[in-house]
Image (cartoon, grey):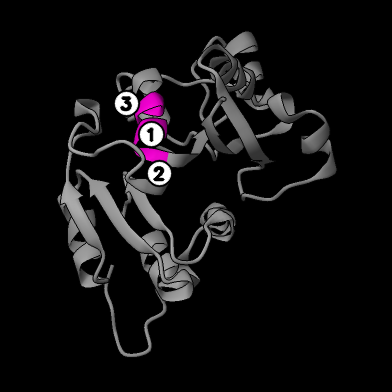
């Protein structure tokens, strides 16, 4: 991400990242898994005085993080979070990453070992247009939330809103807050009523159950 005098990385935040930013308490310690260009961590540092660290594998994104002054470590999330002690962070964030790792169940549990709370986002595979493409056309869905062809996508383990909530119940994970959105990261009453059918992007804040 280039910078220039008067550059405002916060203005470039996606709408879902703006929602996540509002969930983070000022002065927290945050770990962002797959932190991308570092815009979220930069915004959290500037607006909420957060002490943040990012894990990222893409060299171009790492360079963008460094330009923004974001603490970033090159890391493959499939290798886990063994370098971090229990409850090191107040929040561990994982945006659009859960479906792209080989062992999402293990990584989710690692998120809640390392962090007191986890914030996770993913595309909802059960969105109605995806169902139509798969059911009537017999093809893997392509949509605004899932824009890549099956042979180009980084996604390995696509799931639905119901799948994720079922996993949380099975692993004694307490869902504290959730927002289900359309492709433009907007909420609506119909999506709230039928999230697994009408929602395209899911955002969850969760912690270990008691």
Q: Which residue is mark 2?
A: 92
Residue depicted at 26% across the width and 65% down the height? 70
Q: Main secondary structure of the magenta part?
A: helix
Marks 2 and 1 in Cβ contact (< 8 Å)? yes
| Residue 70 visible in the picture | yes
CA distance for labels 3 and 1: 13 Å
| SS at mark 1 in the image | helix
Residue 140 position (above or below residue 203) = above
Residue 94 placed where, x, y %? 41, 41
Left-right relation of 190 to 108: right
Q: Which residues are magenta?
A: 107-115
User: Would you say residue 109 sits in the magenta stretch?
Assistant: yes
Q: Which residue is mark 3?
A: 101
User: Would you say residue 110 sits in the magenta stretch?
Assistant: yes
Q: Nearer the viewer, mark 3 or mark 1?
A: 1
Left-right relation of 175 to 4: right
Instruction: Tell me the crowding category of disc 1: few under 14, some 14 to 19, or many 20 or more residues within 10 angstroms, Cα based.
Output: many
Q: Earlier in the sequence, mark 3 or mark 2?
A: 2
User: Which of the 4 image quadrants contains residue 23?
Assistant: bottom right
Residue depicted at 50% across the width and 34% down the height? 122
Q: Which residue is mark 1?
A: 111
Of residue 91 and residue 192, the one placed in the foreground of this image is 91
Of residue 70 and residue 99, the one placed in the foreground of this image is 70
Residue 137 placed where, x, y %? 59, 13
Residue 147 placed where, x, y %? 46, 36
CA distance for labels 2 and 1: 6 Å
Q: Earlier in the sequence, mark 2 or mark 1?
A: 2
| SS at mark 2 in the image | strand
Residue 185 placed where, x, y %? 62, 49
């Amino acid at each position: 991400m280039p910078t220039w005098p008067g550059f405002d990385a916060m203005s470039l935040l996606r709408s879902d990242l703006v929602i996540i930013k509002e969930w983070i308490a000022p002065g927290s310690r945050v770990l962002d898994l797959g932190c991308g260009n570092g815009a979220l961590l930069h915004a959290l540092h500037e607006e909420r005085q957060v002490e943040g660290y990012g894990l990222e594998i893409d060299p171009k994104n790492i360079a963008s993080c460094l330009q923004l002054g974001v603490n970033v470590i090159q890391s493959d999330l499939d290798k886990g979070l063994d370098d971090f002690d229990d409850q090191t962070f107040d929040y561990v964030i994982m945006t659009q990453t859960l479906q792209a790792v080989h062992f999402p169940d293990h990584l989710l549990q690692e998120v809640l070992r390392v962090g007191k709370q986890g914030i996770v986002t993913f595309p909802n595979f059960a969105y109605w247009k995806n169902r139509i493409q798969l059911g009537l056309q017999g093809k893997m869905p392509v949509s605004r939330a899932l824009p890549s062809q099956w042979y180009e996508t980084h996604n390995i383990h696509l799931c639905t809103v119901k799948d994720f909530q079922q996993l949380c119940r099975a692993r004694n994970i307490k869902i504290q807050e959730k927002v289900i959105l359309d492709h433009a990261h907007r909420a609506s009453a119909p999506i709230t009523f039928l999230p697994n059918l009408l929602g395209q992007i899911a955002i969850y804040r969760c912690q270990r159950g008691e």
